[in-house]
Amino acid sequence: MGKEEFDRKEYVAIHEIYYDNQNNPNTSTMDAILEGTDGENSFSHLKWMLEKMLKALNDPILVHNKKTDKIELLKQEKQDEFSKSFETEK
């Protein structure tokens, strides 16, 4: 897709926003943290991704083992540590 065509597409994206001392937004990240798809489904796609991310917080934590290049479950004691930290943040 060329730049002109890209500029005409509309989509929804989430950026980090930083606030000043009076709680007014004054800057944001240049790159999006999360983007929806092109066009009219952008918002619903973004919502779908966020819902999946929230659900994933209740699933076991997976890690990439660089030695074996495989996805594995995080060791149980680390799973327990993360679970405890989520509980204290609620």
Image: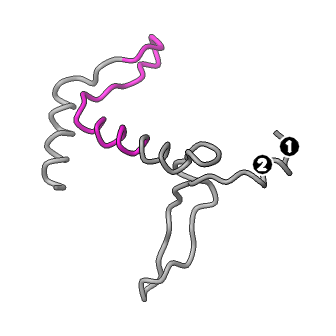
Rendered residue at 22%/36% (across/down): 58
Whether residues under marks 1 and 2 lie with C-beta atoms below 8 angstroms apart, the answer is yes
* Picture quarter with the C terminus: bottom left
Picture quarter containing residue 51?
top left
Left or right: residue 87 versus residue 32 is left
- Eyeballing the image, is 71 above or below 52? above
What amino acid type should be assigned to the residue bearing mark 2?
Phe
Q: Measured from the top left, where is residue 82 in percent x and y?
A: 21, 39
Let me know if residue 65 is in the magenta part: yes
Question: Which numbered marker is on residue 2?
Answer: 1
Q: Which span of residues is magenta-colored?
A: 49-71
Q: Measured from the top left, where is residue 40 in percent x and y?
A: 59, 48
- Closer to the camera, 53 or 23? 53
Q: Which element type, helix, strand or loop, lies under badge 1?
A: loop
Q: Residue furthest front?
A: 40
Picture quarter containing residue 65?
top left
Residue ID for mark 2: 6
Q: Residues within 10 Å of mark 2 (few under 14, many from 20)?
A: few
Q: Which element type, helix, strand or loop, lies under badge 2?
A: helix
* Picture quarter with the N terminus: top right
- Eyeballing the image, is 52 above or below 11? above
Left or right: residue 15 versus residue 51 is right
What amino acid type should be assigned to the residue bearing mark 1?
Gly
Left or right: residue 76 versus residue 62 is left
